[in-house]
Image: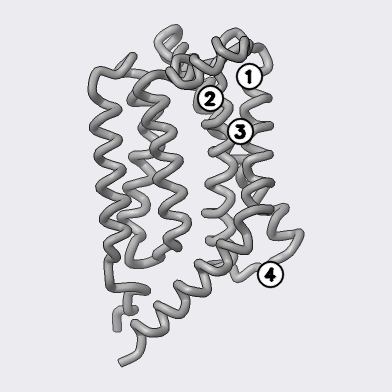
Amino acid sequence: MNKRPEFHKIEPLHLGLLLAFFLVLVWSLINPKDLFTWFLEVLPALIGLIVIVMTFHRFRLTNLVYGLVLIHAVILMIGGHYTYAEMPLFTWLKDTLHLERNYYDRLGHFAQGFIPAVIVREILLRKLELPRGKWLSAIVISVCLAISALYELIEWGVAELTGTAAEAFLGTQGDVWDTQWDMFMALWGAILSLIFLSNIHDKFMRNQEMIRKEEDQP
């Protein structure tokens, strides 16, 4: 006998998030700064969308996670459209505040820790049923750091294979410590995510469990 899907109903919120994703995706593809850079930056968002669609009925995540994933995807798509070193708002901040660089890439890597932390936390709690506490937080932070390090290795690999074509993708802006800064921002993103979102995340998971039980009733 086939196992019953965890959820059956698609909420209007899910359709709204999906529509928003594609609207921003289409916008980002209209006259981007560099099409190759756009592809490299947006590819993780497209992969994430495919994974979410494929697992939606078998392992539906909380709406909090889906909302955060959209935010992360938008950050990636904006970075793909302008490149991280030339995002206009952060260029304006750079000129106005006399900063050394365009800091949009720092925001992107902060999100690289902040948002995956909630995803990893939910998977560990629901699939492995790990107890809440310091060890859970330590594992979540370690996984987020591993993701950040893997992304830096991918950037290095792409740069080695394509040469100067990946310069905008790297976005180092002349900073020899850019890789370390990227991982540092991801680290703090993960830590702050756990501090500020854990209680809210638990409420979303409790609500989702209630909905699942209601749908399982004959």
Earlier sequence position, callout 4 versus callout 2? 2
Q: Mark 4 vs mark 2: give the one in front.
A: 2
Q: Mark 3 vs mark 4: give the one in front.
A: 4
Tell me the SS state at disc 2.
Answer: helix
Q: Is residue 54 above or below residue 8?
A: above
Tell me the SS state at disc 3.
Answer: helix
Q: Amino acid at mark 2?
A: Asp
Residue contact at pointers 2 and 1, CB within 8 angstroms? yes
Q: Is residue 51 above or below residue 98?
A: below
Earlier sequence position, callout 3 versus callout 2? 2
Q: Mark 3 vs mark 2: give the one in front.
A: 2
Q: Residue at x 39, y 45 (%)?
A: 70
User: Mark 4 — residue?
Assistant: 131
Q: Residue at x 51, y 69 (%)?
A: 205
Which percent across, then down, holds residue 27?
Answer: 26, 29
Earlier sequence position, callout 4 versus callout 1? 4
Dot 1 crowding, Cα within 10 Å, few <14, some 14–19, many 20+:
some
- Any part of residue 158 in sight: no
Dot 3 crowding, Cα within 10 Å, few <14, some 14–19, many 20+:
some
Dot 2 crowding, Cα within 10 Å, few <14, some 14–19, many 20+:
many
Q: Amino acid at mark 4?
A: Pro
User: Mark 2 — residue?
Assistant: 105
Which percent across, then down, holds residue 190?
Answer: 64, 45
User: Mark 1 — residue?
Assistant: 178
Q: Amino acid at mark 3?
A: Ala
Which percent across, then down, holds residue 57?
Answer: 32, 66
User: Mark 3 — residue?
Assistant: 149
Earlier sequence position, callout 2 versus callout 1? 2
Quadrant of residue 150 within the rendered picture: top right
Earlier sequence position, callout 3 versus callout 4? 4
Q: Amino acid at mark 1?
A: Asp
Residue contact at pointers 4 and 1, CB within 8 angstroms? no
